[in-house]
């Protein structure tokens, strides 16, 4: 075999091997590696350059034919590379599209819907009703002074009525957890009464705390919503009208209420308010303990001492106040037999509301 055909054979072999290898390339990385092996990289010479080096050792007359053939091989390989590059790009795009494809027939993962706590729902509903009757909603703090919680509400130290509320004390003398929302009355009068010169209508929702044995019937924390209205000519009739309208909006158009005489140190006179629930079914009988009436609030005319402590002159001003416990009412209405359910965080309970 002549020297010339031998070098041509080398080129042919190189071309055939490179093309065969190119056919197996399916990724951009492999394609780049293939290109580097043949045409060289920054760091290494390519196989084609190495084959071309044979040119120098060929007889002068053989060189043009070899050079021509080498150039043909180079062009053929470059053309094949370009064609393969298009194919690889398409294949990679296809792969990316099919791996990211959305199967619209796949059922969605169910989303757990959150909701407000039943007590929050009730408090908000009550606030909305009173807002509609012209009351502002005001939040007063859970941590209170003994003065606001008792003393300024007409219960000086050693007053026997303090026994109605078992109290959580803090390590700070004179600072307690509020046992009812009534201290908010003092705060509301002082915050909005303009030194006893302006009428106010405020409701105060929030948590109260009692140092009590936790049982099915009593919890050491629960919500109340307090209301207070102070004006120049407010009478018990205003309390009655307001609570009647509240009951209509809360319990339906034909709701009726009644007042029963009661005692609270911060009101005079004091009442308890019942809404007529009915006695049609066995359940009604259970809810109302056979009376047909459902107790919804304690209330009364703000005691002159309390008015004075709020900055008002009781000779000029009068007002009514009320306090409700929404959990107690919810328990009766929904037949909840254990008050501990409210704060047990058991979703089976909470999801029913
Ligand atoms: N604070 C009372 C309690 O926790 C409820 C109450 C009674 C509030 C009469 C009032 C009221 O505003 O006038 O038992």
Image (cartoon, helix red, strand yellow):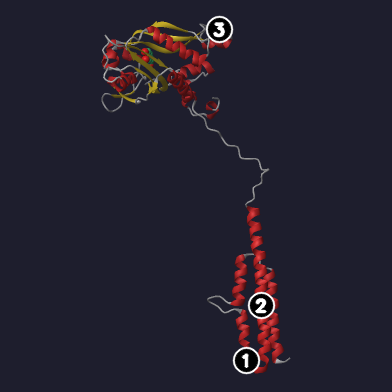
Q: Residue at x 61, y 83 (%)?
A: 50
**Numbered badge on residue 46:** none
Residue in view at x 46 percent, y 24 percent: 124
Which image quarter has ligand 1?
A: top left
State the SS at label 1: helix
Find residue 113 and report its horizontal and vertical position in percent: 55, 33
The answer to whether residue 240 is left or right of residue 177 is right
Residue bearing the label numbered 1: 57
Q: Is residue 112 above or below residue 241?
A: below
Residue 64 x, y percent position in the rendering: 66, 89
Q: Are marks 3 and 1 in contact (CB under 8 Å)?
A: no
Q: Is residue 204 left or right of residue 342?
A: left
Q: Which mark is residue 279?
A: 3
Q: Position of residue 191 (x, y in %)?
A: 30, 23
**Mark 3 packing: few (<14 Cα in 10 Å), some, or many (20+)?**
some
Compared to residue 322, the image places residue 177 above or below, namely below
Viewer-side label of 3, 1 = 1
Tag 1: Cα neighbours inside 10 Å, few (<14), some, or many (≥20)? few
- Which marked residue is nearer to the observer: mark 2 or mark 3? 2
Q: Which residue lies at the image location 34% right of the left edge and 12% below the top edge?
A: 319
The residue tagged 2 is: 75
Q: Earlier in the sequence, mark 1 or mark 2?
A: 1
Q: Residues within 10 Å of mark 2 (few under 14, many from 20)?
A: few
Q: Quadrant of residue 168?
A: top left
């Amino acid at each position: 075999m002549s020297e010339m055909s031998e070098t041509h054979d080398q080129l042919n072999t190189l071309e055939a091997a490179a093309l065969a290898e190119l056919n197996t390339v399916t990724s951009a990385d492999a394609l780049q590696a293939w290109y580097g092996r043949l045409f060289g990289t920054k760091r290494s010479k390519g196989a084609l350059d190495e084959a071309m080096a044979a040119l120098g050792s060929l007889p002068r007359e053989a060189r043009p034919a070899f050079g021509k053939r080498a150039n043909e091989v180079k062009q053929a390989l470059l053309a094949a590379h370009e064609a393969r590059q298009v194919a690889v790009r398409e294949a990679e795009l296809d792969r990316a599209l099919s791996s990211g494809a959305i199967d619209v027939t796949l059922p969605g993962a169910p989303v757990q819907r959150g909701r407000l706590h039943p007590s929050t729902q009730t408090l908000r509903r009550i606030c909305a009703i009173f807002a509609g009757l012209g009351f502002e909603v005001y939040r007063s703090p859970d941590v209170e002074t003994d003065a606001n919680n008792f003393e300024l509400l007409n219960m000086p130290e050693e007053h026997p009525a303090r026994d109605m509320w078992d109290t959580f004390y803090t390590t700070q003398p004179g600072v307690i957890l509020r046992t009812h929302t009534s201290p908010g009355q003092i705060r509301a009068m002082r915050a909005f009464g303009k030194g006893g010169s302006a009428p106010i209508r405020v409701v105060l929702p929030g948590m109260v705390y009692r140092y009590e044995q936790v049982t099915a019937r009593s919890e050491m924390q629960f919500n109340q919503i307090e209301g207070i209205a102070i004006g120049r000519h407010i009478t018990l009739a205003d309390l009655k009208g307001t609570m009647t309208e509240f009951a209509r909006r809360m319990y339906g158009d034909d709701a009726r209420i009644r007042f029963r005489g009661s005692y609270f140190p911060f009101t005079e006179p004091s009442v308890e308010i019942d809404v007529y629930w009915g006695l049609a079914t066995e359940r009604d009988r259970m809810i109302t303990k056979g009376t047909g009436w459902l107790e919804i609030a304690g209330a009364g005319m703000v005691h002159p001492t309390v008015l004075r402590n709020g900055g008002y002159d009781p000779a000029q001003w009068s007002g009514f106040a009320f306090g409700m416990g929404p959990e107690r009412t919810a328990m009766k209405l929904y037949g909840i037999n254990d008050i501990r359910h409210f704060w047990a965080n058991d979703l089976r309970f909470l999801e029913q509301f």
